[in-house]
Image (cartoon, rainbow, N blue to C red):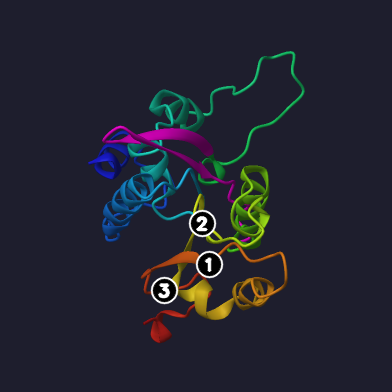
Amino acid sequence: VFDQFLGAKFTTLKRYSGEGAEGMMAFFDLCFDKSAQSGVENVVVCMPHRGRNNLLVCMLNYPAAVMFRKIKGKREFPADVKSTGDVLSHLYTSTDLDYNGKNVHVSLIPNPSHLEANNPVAVGKARSKQLSLKDGHYSSNDKNDETRHGDKVLCIQVHGDASFAGQGIIPETFQLSHLPNYSVGGSIHLVTNNQIGYTTPQNLAR
């Protein structure tokens, strides 16, 4: 419905629709719900363009009015502030979600358009949260009997199918995750089937 609204109201907007990948929203809703019920306190999410606007507005409480102002090219900062904004597909937010009385804090980190570049950043942010919360390897419990690495913080990485297969930063992040004191107890990876990468010739598309 949100994509249909944007398509009707902003017909020339390059919005990287979530249409055809609506299952992402069901995945996130279930994942956030299960995280809250399992005692996870923080979820760190990184994702590229597709479906990002849907997640921001429909699930992460990003104000639709703020997004619409940006789409219309309205000023984001006061006139006396010498700053410029960023493009629509780079927006980010953090919010608290409540699932049946259980709270979970979700952070969607910025998307730099260099697709997948935010993957190691998300892992690093998850690790810093674990350090702050004394989670897992950072627990005061030396034997670590009562807490496993990653019990309080979850990292979710969303990929496009072309970038997941073709960009080296993904296996590099996998390798980094095996280094001492870098692991966050694993990440959940969601690969979106876009069926075509930006550089794929039409006759070679999947």
Q: Check disc 1 and give the amino acid type.
A: Gly
**Disc 2 designates what residue?**
146
- Residue 136 lies, in percent from the top left, at 59, 57
In this picture, which residue range is highlighted in magenta?
A: 93-114
Is 98 a magenta residue? yes
In 3D space, how far apart are the residues under numbered discs 1 and 3 (Cα atoms)?
A: 28 Å
* CA separation in Å, label 3 and label 2: 45 Å
Q: Position of residue 53 (x, y in %)?
A: 41, 43
Q: Position of residue 138 (x, y in %)?
A: 67, 54
Identify the residue at horizontal 48%, vertical 75% (top origin). 162
**Element type at mark 2:** loop
Regarding mark 3 in the picture, which secondary structure is present there?
A: loop
- The label shown at residue 186 is 1
Q: Secondary structure at mark 1?
A: loop
Query: Quadrant of the image for the C terminus?
Result: bottom left
Amino acid type for the residue under numbered disc 3: Ile
Q: Is residue 67 above or below residue 199?
A: above
The N terminus - image quarter = top left
Relative to 150, does residue 78 appear above or below in the rendering? above
Distance CA(mark 2)–CA(mark 1): 18 Å
Q: Is residue 202 magenta?
A: no
Instruction: Kindly indicate the quadrant of the structure image that contains residue 57.
Output: top left
Numbered mark located on residue 196 in the image: 3
Quick one: label 3 or label 2, which is nearer the N terminus? 2
Q: Quadrant of residue 141?
A: bottom right
Is 91 left or right of 203, judged from the image as shown? right
Position of 57 with respect to 82 (left or right) is: left
Q: Earlier in the sequence, mark 1 or mark 3?
A: 1
Along the viewing direction, whichever of 183 and 6 lies nearer the viewer = 183
